[in-house]
């Protein structure tokens, strides 16, 4: 697999009062075509900032991001984005939400409907085509958001804690729904989360970030079989990876707390 996404020495600082806050410091990694990568780190480490830079919603202070060897200079349709908040249009039906980007591209109605039907089946929402978002649960809304992003056929799907607002039971089901969709589409996915189990269950690789300013502390190779049933989370191999990740995150959380105490 060739390199799809390259993050090369990306740093980001923000003005804060009379000084500046350094959110990211020389973060570098690559993502291969079709890979599922999760970004994991302590709170405030710059995970979401890094994802927004890759999306083209923010500019790095230094460094660059390449997609397919081309520099990213702003938002583009080749990168789909799914946020934690439900970003559906409340006045549009499920069908119309999924078709929205395809309509902007000028696809004929019959073609749009065929694509929407495919992804509705994939995410398990056949039968809810004409429902409005207000009549859907949180998990169902996020399914529609994922379907809408996939329907636009992006080269890379960027996901910023998309299951963070869901209850624990719905969250675990949504992880399996997403993996099913990924196995079907084989999209390149970069997924931000603070949940260690989620990061391991979904990913080919887990990129563990340091405390702020964030950079890549470690790369955990998730050599677990696919497709992945829920029962995988109780296996010895999974628990070993979970222990490694928790230890790395704890080190960075303690470092962040000690830094706050020393500067207070």
Image (cartoon, helix red, strand yellow):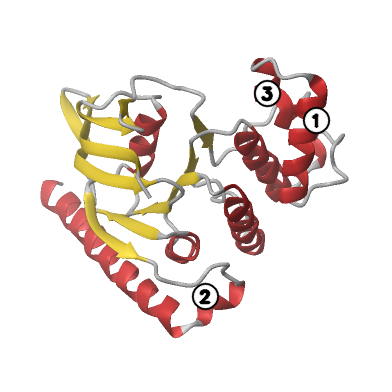
Q: How many marks?
A: 3
Q: Label for residue 102?
A: 3
Instruction: In the rendered view, tell whether residue 259 sits above or below residue 100.
Output: below
First in residue order: circle 2 vs circle 1: 1
Q: Residue furthest left?
A: 262
First in residue order: circle 1 vs circle 3: 3
Q: Residue furthest front?
A: 1
Please name the residue shown 60% across and 72% down the image.
Answer: 230
Q: Label for residue 259?
A: none
State if disc 3 and disc 1 touch (CB < 8 Å): no
Q: Residues within 10 Å of mark 3 (few under 14, many from 20)?
A: many
Q: Residue furthest bottom?
A: 236
State if disc 1 and disc 2 touch (CB < 8 Å): no
The image shows residue 20 at horizontal and vertical percentages of 17, 28
Which quadrant of the figure has residue 91? top right
The foreground one among 222 and 81 is 222
Disc 2 to disc 1, C-alpha distance: 37 Å
Disc 3 to disc 2, C-alpha distance: 37 Å
Instruction: In the rendered view, tell whether residue 185 sits above or below residue 61.
Output: below
The image shows residue 41 at horizontal and vertical percentages of 33, 54
First in residue order: circle 3 vs circle 2: 3
Please name the residue shown 54% across and 50% down the image.
Answer: 164
The foreground one among 82 and 98 is 98
Q: Secondary structure at mark 2?
A: helix
Which tag is nearer the camera, tag 2 or tag 1?
1
Q: Residues within 10 Å of mark 1 (few under 14, many from 20)?
A: some
The image shows residue 209 at horizontal and vertical percentages of 27, 52
Instruction: In the rendered view, tell whether residue 4 sits above or below residue 139.
Output: above
- Determine which residue is flagged by label 2: 233
């Amino acid at each position: 697999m060739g390199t799809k996404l390259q993050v090369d020495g990306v740093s980001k600082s923000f003005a804060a009062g009379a000084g500046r806050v350094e959110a990211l410091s020389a973060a570098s990694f690559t993502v291969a075509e079709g890979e599922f990568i999760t970004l994991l780190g302590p709170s405030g480490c710059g995970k979401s900032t890094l994802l927004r830079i890759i999306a083209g919603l923010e500019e790095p202070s230094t460094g660059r991001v390449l997609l397919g060897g081309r520099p990213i200079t702003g938002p583009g349709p080749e990168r789909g984005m799914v946020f934690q908040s439900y970003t559906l249009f409340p006045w549009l039906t499920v069908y119309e939400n999924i078709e929205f980007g395809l309509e902007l591209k000028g696809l004929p109605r019959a073609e749009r409907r065929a694509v929407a039907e495919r992804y509705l089946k994939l995410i398990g929402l056949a039968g809810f085509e004409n429902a409005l978002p207000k009549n859907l649960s949180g998990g169902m809304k996020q399914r529609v958001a994922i379907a809408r992003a996939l329907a636009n056929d992006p080269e890379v799907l960027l996901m910023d804690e998309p299951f963070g607002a869901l209850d624990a039971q719905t969250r675990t089901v949504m992880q399996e729904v997403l993996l099913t969709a990924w196995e079907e589409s084989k999209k390149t996915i970069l997924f931000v989360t603070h949940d260690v189990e989620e990061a391991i269950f979904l990913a080919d690789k887990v990129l563990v970030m340091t405390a702020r300013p964030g950079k890549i502390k470690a790369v955990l190779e998730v050599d677990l079989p696919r497709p992945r049933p829920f029962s995988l989370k109780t296996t010895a191999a999974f628990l070993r990876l979970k222990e490694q990740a928790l230890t790395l995150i704890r080190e960075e959380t303690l470092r962040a707390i000690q830094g706050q105490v020393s500067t207070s």
